[in-house]
Amino acid sequence: MKHSKAYLRARFHKLPSLRFEDQKLTSFAGLVLFQALFAHLDLKNRLKRCFSHSDSSSSYGLHNILFLLILHLLMGFRRLSDVEYYHGDPMVERLAGLRTLPDKSTISRALADMDATSVGQVRDLSRAFVLQRLGREDFDRLTLDFDGSVLSTKRHAEGSAVGFNKVKKGARSYYPLFCTVAQTGQFFDMHHRPGNVHDSNGAAQFIEQCLDTARRTSPNAVLESRLDSAFFSKDILAIFEARGADFSISVPFERFAELKGMIEARKHWVPIDDEWSYFETGWKPKSWDKRHRFLFVRKRVKRQRKGPLQLDLFEPRDFDFEYKVIVTNKREDAQAVIQFHNGRGSQEAIFGNAKQNVALGVIPTKRLEGNQIYTLCAMMAHNFSHELQMLASPRRLQDTAKRPAAWTFETIATLRRRIIQRAGRILRPQGKLTLSMSANKAVQEDLLHFIDRIKDAA
């Protein structure tokens, strides 16, 4: 509909007076989506069972504190003190099942009450939600990627240590080893470690546990993994082969003079495209008793030139090559294996999104178990944002060599801007509980679509 300029344009100069009243107003009306999701997953009761052994004196209950922390991260808050900025929000209170929300000190004390048993049971629950989704989807193959990620702390925290930290050199940190599922873009499990350990510390047992757990849930699926050079060892390869799982692992070939010599002596490289080429051979380190398939890959990159150039006459283009070596037991052609291995960069995107959007990198307390619980809450917040979207949209049927996620996911930050951070009012017209929001067609369509799909899944 076309309107006149006089109708469209208006002048507003006067600053309105401010008045703060309890009118059952919420800034997070879109949390109604997660209310439906959490009811579908029976999250509150399952969290409660994680603390059935605890004798904590918290009047709120440790499971309610944990539930609130997950909401806290889904809403985009990072620090415990940020709870003050949604204190009294009726939607958050209803979703948490509390008449009043705890303050920062109460949450800190609850985190201090966490013990190793609590951490273990919450970790099992986090993994159980992912397994529930994997069992429902019945994937033909599951791609489990393993890598560590630095979680820095600005102060001393129990169990932290000074280790490699390219962002904050000299800072104390944790260095947990994560397992993620490429098909769902979710965190599968975590092995918590101090910041001064090598990538491979505790990796063998953790990889065994993840593969065995995935195999029990998806007995007919092809299990496969991608790892960097820190995990290159005879024992790690043996774990995958003993479980019939495919792998591709980067090789620290600078440690092996033989591999370097093979690259230097190679005359013919098989081209993949204008950028990539390769050759392959069967090989083993001297201390090993079995040969494996080694792929030697090079990538053409532009060489940086220094000094003056005669740009008016010509623009010289010189090229160098970057090399890497991959060991694998996969039987596909070399191009498919290389693309599969290069797809492991998707795990870095999961880490980046979780650190930026659900505070995966935040260390809130001085207690080890409290920090582990907070990390698990961040993992679950990320996973629940994907679970919501998986319920609401069909998965892609076509798979590619890089093993992208089977759904197109929006980040939780996008969901906040579009849906979650919406003003609303909780009313009871004629005694019927009602959440009233502004008449925005796009928000209405998205909200109703999500809620309908959750109801269909129930």
Image (spheres, grey):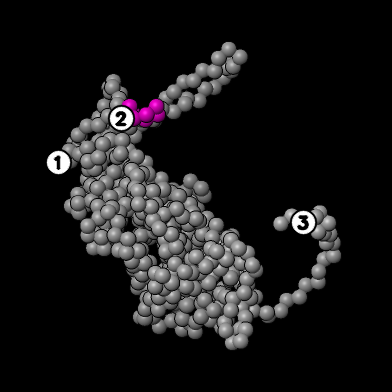
Q: Provide residue 444's location: percent of width, then percent of height.
A: 57, 66
- Mark 3 secondary-structure assignment: loop
Name the residue type under label 3. His
Q: Quadrant of the C terminus?
A: bottom left
Q: Is residue 159 positioned above or below 349 on the image?
A: below
Viewer-proximal residue, 385 or 424? 424
Q: Provide residue 240's location: percent of width, then percent of height.
A: 23, 50
Q: State which tag comes first along the sequence, 2 or 1.
A: 2
The residue wearing badge 1 is: 289
Which region of the structure is painted magenta? 271-277
Name the residue type under label 2. Tyr
The image's mark for residue 278 is: 2
The residue wearing badge 3 is: 3
Name the residue type under label 1. Asp
Q: Nearer the viewer, mark 3 or mark 2?
A: 3
Q: Provide residue 2's location: percent of width, then percent of height.
A: 74, 55
